[in-house]
Amino acid sequence: MRIGVNALYLIPGQVGGTEIYLRSLLEAMIESAPSHDYFIFTNQETQADPLPGEAVPQPVRASNRPSRILWEQTGLPLSALRQRIDVLFNPGFTAPVLAPCPQVTVFHDLQHKRHPEHFRLFDLPAWRLMLFASACASQRLIAVSEATRRDLLRYYPLEANRVHIIEHGVDERMFAIGREPDAACPYLLCVSTLHPHKNLERLVSVFGRFRERHPRLRLVLAGMKGFRTKVIEQSISELGLRDAVEVTGWLEREQLYGLYRGAIGFVYPSTFEGFGMPVLEALAAGLPVACSGIEPLRSVAGGTALLFDPHSDDSMLEALTCLITSPPEGGVAWARQFSWRRAAQSTLEVLASAAGLPTAPSHRSSHHGT
């Protein structure tokens, strides 16, 4: 196949987990099926940090969202036509409405439908229009979890057989980082974008209570600084936790490995997720994990994490206490079931199916069916 990959949305270091998803999946796809041709339609920001595959640079900046969306709808289809693309893969929610070939689009979540209150008013109409149009224009859709698939079928007029569940893989380096908890300055780790649904203000507040019993412990919030950054930092100051809570911002992978290596535990308090990659990475790294008892986190953790009610301070506090006193086990073995190679093979099958080409025997990546 001549596979086109729509990477116009990618701004290195500024789109959170969808960047890790794209880079990891592309690498595994090319490794699994090198006989295909991979044409990566890139923006100007990505040229300094290239993706695997053959770059097809486009004259647009993703940081100018209206310009990027306009080019995606006009210039990208023409570029795909010139490259004689067999199938266009859209890994970041949006797709051209009029494309010269079949399309497969990935939906990481439908937060704009489930929690519109977390979106800026001037952004919401565009999210609603573009994602609906992309779903309707795509021959196949990929949902990263059963929860996201249910949302797609609930909110959009789609036939069930068009939507495929392909769960994320996990970075193989996580299994080999070698835990060395920081005994001199012990800390709990949370890897998360600082957005409203990540529930980090509540975590900071609960951690303040938790630290009264464990005064040596710190909390490290590692991830892209999102819409809620100022409020979270203000909360840290008001609670007198400046010396106890660190907000790192976006980190390179090597720095992140170091944080996983040195942590004594991992906490993830999100109230809404499409998948929950940081939970899986923490399990693979051998960290004891406490996370929200919501789907899909419950399924991602597979019974190897402490679960709590993300809306209850007391429930979260109890989980943090158990994380230190009675840490859960079995996370590494569970995490080994998830691999980017498996996700890549399943994605390639869906791409071939959309293009009307024969597919190999199934390597279905979901543990919960399609």
Image: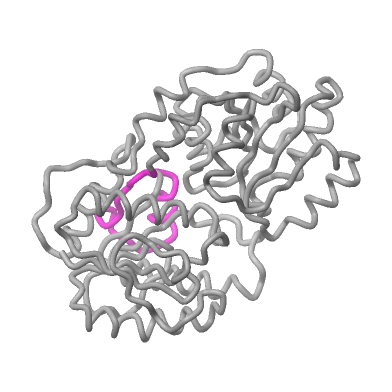
Q: Is residue 127 left or right of residue 83?
A: right
Q: Residue at x 24, y 41 (%)?
A: 364
Answer whether residue 97 is magenta in the image: no
Query: Residue 135's quadrant in the figure?
Result: bottom left
Q: Horizontal and vertical percent for residue 239?
A: 89, 41
Using the image as rendered, state which of residue 348 and residue 189 is in the foreground.
Answer: 189
Residue reaching furthest top?
326
Q: Residue furthest left?
A: 358
Q: State yes or no: residue 150 in magenta.
A: yes
Residue at (56% x, 75% y) in the render: 63
Total label count? 0
Q: Quadrant of the N terminus?
A: bottom left
Q: Nearer the viewer, residue 295 or 212?
A: 212
Estimate the x, y position of residue 30 in percent, counting from the top left: 25, 54
* Relative horizontal placement of residue 320, taking residue 124 as reference (left or right): right
Please, is residue 80 above or below residue 91 in the view? below
Up-down: is 222 above or below 78? above
Please say if 343 is above or below 283: below
Q: Picture coordinates of residue 252 (x, y %)?
A: 56, 50
Region rendered in magenta = 146-168
234 or 130: which is nearer to us?
A: 234
Q: Residue at x 33, y 46 (%)?
A: 166
